[in-house]
Amino acid sequence: MTPEDRQLIMGLVHVPGGGRRLSPEEVLQHFRTEDGQALGCRLLQDALDRRDALDVEMALILCTSFGFTADHVSPLVQLCWAEWHQKHEDVVAALSALRSPRAVDALHHAAQWVPDYLDYDENRSLAAKAIRGLGALPGPEAEHALMQLLESNEAVVRERAAQQLERRKP
């Protein structure tokens, strides 16, 4: 991604009291495409392939503006495991919203892992988001992952997993 590409994508960010500086259509025009979801997926995969943390952030901004699809699941799952960026909470939020059973292992990992840059977070917000995401996923794999989290050494993880399991009961 060029600096100009990044600057345009930043124009999609809502500024408090000011809205967006650019419309989604202007960004699509710059990238010479009409499909923002496909563009976001392509940029996300490219940033992942290059291990470029800044471009992961830019691609996630663009994806959030245009929406995530099932095509985004694979790069998002890979990003959930990647230690070289600092957007794990955004990645987990996107995976949770997509509600794909393919995300179970990645969300289970995120519920247990504390990246160095989040070591200060006693509330374990990454884990909380991942556990909520697991709770929203259909299927026995997600339920099994939540049951495994009941055995965590961390009370906050156990408690949140128990809440999600209780919520899943008919």
Image (spheres, rainbow, N blue to C red):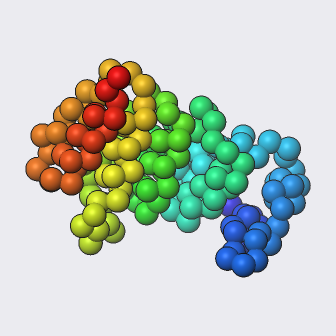
Q: Position of residue 10 (x, y in %)?
A: 70, 69
Q: Is residue 119 above or below residue 138?
A: below
Q: At 14% across and 45% down in the image, what residue appears? A: 152
Q: Position of residue 32 (x, y in %)?
A: 87, 50
Q: Is residue 44 left or right of residue 155?
A: right
> Which quadrant would the C terminus be assigned to in this image?
top left
> Which quadrant would the N terminus be assigned to in this image?
bottom right
Q: Is residue 94 left or right of residue 43?
A: left
Residue in the foreground of this view, choosing between 114 and 146: 146
Q: At 33% across and 52% down in the image, what residue appears? A: 128
Asked if one can make out residue 88 in the rendered structure from this viewpoint, the answer is yes
Q: At 58% across and 39% down in the image, what residue appears? A: 72
Q: Position of residue 51 (x, y in %)?
A: 49, 55
Q: Is residue 27 above or below residue 49?
A: below
Residue in the foreground of this view, choosing between 79 and 152: 152
Q: Quadrant of residue 123?
A: bottom left
Q: Is residue 122 above or below residue 38?
A: below
